[in-house]
Amino acid sequence: MTWPVLQDPVFATYVAGASIMILKAQFMPWLIVWRMMRAKGGFRSPEDLRRTPLNPDPNPRQLEPNERVERVRRIQQNDLESIPYFLVIGLLFLLTRPSLIVAQWLFCGYVVTRLAHFAAYLTSQTHDLRAALWTPGSLILIYMAVRTLLTAFGL
Amino acid sequence: MTWPVLQDPVFATYVAGASIMILKAQFMPWLIVWRMMRAKGGFRSPEDLRRTPLNPDPNPRQLEPNERVERVRRIQQNDLESIPYFLVIGLLFLLTRPSLIVAQWLFCGYVVTRLAHFAAYLTSQTHDLRAALWTPGSLILIYMAVRTLLTAFGL
Amino acid sequence: MTWPVLQDPVFATYVAGASIMILKAQFMPWLIVWRMMRAKGGFRSPEDLRRTPLNPDPNPRQLEPNERVERVRRIQQNDLESIPYFLVIGLLFLLTRPSLIVAQWLFCGYVVTRLAHFAAYLTSQTHDLRAALWTPGSLILIYMAVRTLLTAFGL
């Protein structure tokens, strides 16, 4: 049996969106590890040049930036600049009692455009396309924050 | 109609403070975009040198760090190191049933000193002033976390 | 008097774990400040080279990266890539009504392995040991997110 609050479809929509974004975010470090192992490089700490089972043949060039690794690090940083704020403002926005259709558009819109932004960034699409896919998520965050702020002031 | 919990002024103070900090944080990427467009540089991905409507005249120097852009990136990073933790501990701290006056001092103190820290950082004030404006926010976080931890242990 | 919800030991376990991780995270900037003051360097903003009471004898080399400072910055970044997500998914995971023993294993497992990861990173242990201590926390996050997502869909 789950908590009754999850039987509210608006709340369940938020919880689903939040869980998906956290899974997406936690996929990034694994992708970084995968690319570091493939490249045998892109490391950042001096001790990573020690000979170990995971790095049997160390080499000082392993500490140089590797573009395939750095790309995922930039994507991960882009996530950090947005997802934690989405997770909190999405929850607080529920206090404004949005209708189900509004909640679905906002939460699904955020999740879908963030996943599309990830795909565009990973495959090195143009800055213009990346910007077009980043903007809706940011506007959704701003809308939810303004709406929540007004509600907190009883407006 | 809003949720009854928002009629609790302590809770409403938290929600207002959290919304303001999220709006502040989401303003940073727009400020970075604005400064990158003004400088026509400060980009970070190789594909940003492609000729596109938003970058009609690409130039390899566009990938070099631009101090006006990097400054806002440092401010954004400083936000990431503090605001997400504030958002969560502020919510959990409500479980300790703080008085309204204590909640107002803590939440407003955090918001006001963070905004002042932003102004000082953006205008290149001394490290000493920046440190003086950063410290209260950090102490407020630590106080709320210790208080919440003690409450969780029934102390 | 505290909120009745804290009398639920599963919820109290989450609140304790979250508070500890926030305290840990907020300790990082103070450690960075401490190491910058010891090294009289590792600064990042041009204005940090001004003569002030905290920096009476400025020197351009103070803006060069200092490995002892950069190490804590890397640790802090590693925290940012994990702890905010833990704080939110831990809370939402409570909606799946985990048993106390499961909640204790997950929350304590996360906290203990993150603290051990910190100790290993700070003392420059091998990449292999760091990876072994990082992996449980990431798997705990992924497990909680999948479980929460399934519950949101009524599965």
Image: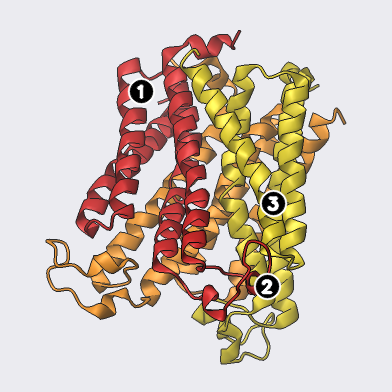
Chain colours: A red, B orange, C yellow
Q: Chain of mark 2?
A: A
Q: Identify residue for label 2.
A: A50
Callout 3 crowding tier (Cα within 10 Å): few <14, some 14–19, many ≥20:
few
Q: Which mark is residue C132?
A: 3
The chain holding disc 3 is C
On whether disc 2 and disc 3 are found on a single subunit, the reply is no
Residue A129: image location, x then y, percent: 21, 52
Q: Amino acid at mark 1?
A: Ala
User: In the rendered image, which quarter is residue B100 located in?
Assistant: top right
- Chain ID at mark 1: A
Q: CA distance from mark 2 to mark 3?
A: 16 Å
Image marks 2 and 1: residues in contact by CB distance under 8 Å: no
Quadrant placement of the N terminus of chain B: top left
Q: Is residue C41 above or below residue B98?
A: below
Q: What residue is at 66 percent from the left and 50 percent from the top? A: C134
Which amino acid type is shown beneath numbered disc 2?
A: Arg
| The C terminus of chain B: image quadrant | top right
Q: Dot 2 lies on which element?
A: loop
Specify the quadrant of the image occupied by residue C8: top right
Residue at left offset 73%, top offset 57%: C118
Image vertical order of residue A59 relative to residue A55, above or below = below
Instruction: Residue at 61%, 25% (x, y): give it.
Output: C93
What mark, if any, has residue A103 been given in the picture? Answer: 1
Q: Are marks 1 and 3 on the same chain?
A: no
Q: CA distance from mark 2 to mark 1?
A: 51 Å
- Would residue B97 be seen by someone viewing this image from the given angle? no
- Location of residue C35 in the rendering, given as x and y in whole percent from the top left corner: 72, 73
Q: Dot 1: within a 10 Å radius of its alpha carbon, few (fewer than 14), some, or many (20 or more) residues?
A: many
In the displayed structure image, the side of residue A78 where residue C74 appears, left or right:
right
